[in-house]
């Protein structure tokens, strides 16, 4: 009996340690009407923030996801997080250090958004702590080219490849499996 009471207490404490941030999510969604094309979840355990892309409407795209993420950074700019877990349907794909997230939030609205976009992938870590993308050096045209390639690759690895695969499978499922014989058609 004591074990059951202890287990119930432990589960209730663990259940309270990760909180959904539904109210904050709604504020971020309503910051810009275009944000509603991104279906995402926010949660926190106090030290880490989880930003999980769930789906994107047919009208949305990668820039919409990044705008919502940057609006999230702006909203939480006064809160300190160790890490931001960038997830797709709850599975961690990348990690952003809390200090980088804070800089994005503080700079949002004053920093050139193209610069923020271009340099975003080089701030990301893989779940093992290694850098997801390298910091490039070189001339402006070279930097723009390779950083935008990294940005595109990051979106694909984060959520886009899986979403596009799902949408293609759904479209293919609607195709007919049986066809009328040629003699009947012609």
Image (spheres, grey):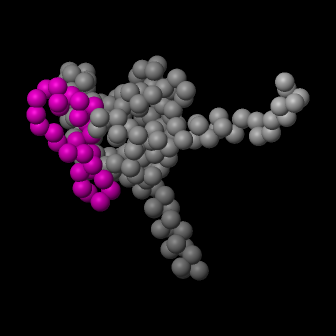
In the rendered view, would you say 60 is above or below 95?
above
Q: In terms of image quadrants, where is residue 63?
A: top left
In the rendered view, would you say 99 is above or below 115?
below
Q: Residue 107: x percent and y percent?
A: 21, 28
Q: In this view of the protein, can residue 20 be seen by the observer?
A: no
Name the residue rendered at 54%, 68% in the picture. 8
Q: Nearer the viewer, residue 181 or 44?
A: 181
Q: In this view of the protein, can residue 154 be seen by the observer?
A: yes
Left or right placement of residue 70 versus residue 176 in this view: left
Q: Nearer the viewer, residue 181 or 125?
A: 181
Name the residue rendered at 80%, 39% in the picture. 178
* Total tally of numbered discs in the picture: 0
Q: Nearer the viewer, residue 131 or 84?
A: 131
Q: Residue 91: x percent and y percent?
A: 45, 52
Q: Nearer the viewer, residue 64 or 26?
A: 64
Quadrant of the frame with the N terminus: bottom right
Residue furthest to the right: 184
Q: In terms of image quadrants, where is residue 99?
A: top left
Left or right placement of residue 64 versus residue 8 in this view: left
In the rendered view, would you say 22 is above or below 111?
below
Q: Residue 127: x percent and y percent?
A: 33, 56
Q: Which residues are magenta?
A: 120-148
Quadrant of the frame with the C terminus: top right
Name the residue rendered at 45%, 28% in the picture. 61
In the rendered view, would you say 66 is above or below 121?
above
Left or right placement of residue 181 versus residue 33 in this view: right
Q: Residue 84: x percent and y percent?
A: 32, 46
Magenta span contains residue 10: no
Left or right placement of residue 74 versus residue 157 in this view: left
Magenta span contains residue 144: yes
Name the residue rendered at 57%, 41% in the picture. 166
């Amino acid at each position: 009996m004591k074990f059951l009471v202890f287990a119930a207490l432990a589960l209730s404490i663990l259940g309270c340690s990760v909180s959904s941030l539904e109210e904050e999510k709604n504020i971020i969604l309503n910051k810009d009407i275009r944000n509603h094309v991104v279906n995402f979840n926010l949660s926190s355990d106090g030290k880490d923030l989880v930003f999980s892309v769930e789906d994107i409407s047919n009208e949305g795209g990668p820039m919409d996801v990044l705008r919502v993420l940057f609006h999230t950074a702006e909203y939480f700019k006064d809160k300190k997080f160790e890490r931001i877990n960038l997830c797709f349907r709850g599975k961690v794909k990348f990690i952003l250090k809390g200090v980088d997230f804070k800089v994005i939030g503080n700079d949002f609205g004053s920093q050139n958004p193209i610069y923020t976009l271009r340099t975003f992938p080089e701030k990301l870590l893989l779940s093992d702590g290694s850098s997801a993308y390298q910091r490039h050096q070189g001339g402006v045209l070279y930097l723009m080219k390779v950083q935008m390639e990294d940005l595109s690759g990051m979106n694909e690895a984060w959520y886009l490849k899986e979403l596009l695969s799902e949408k293609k499978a759904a479209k293919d499922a609607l195709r007919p499996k049986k066809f009328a014989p040629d003699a009947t058609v012609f």
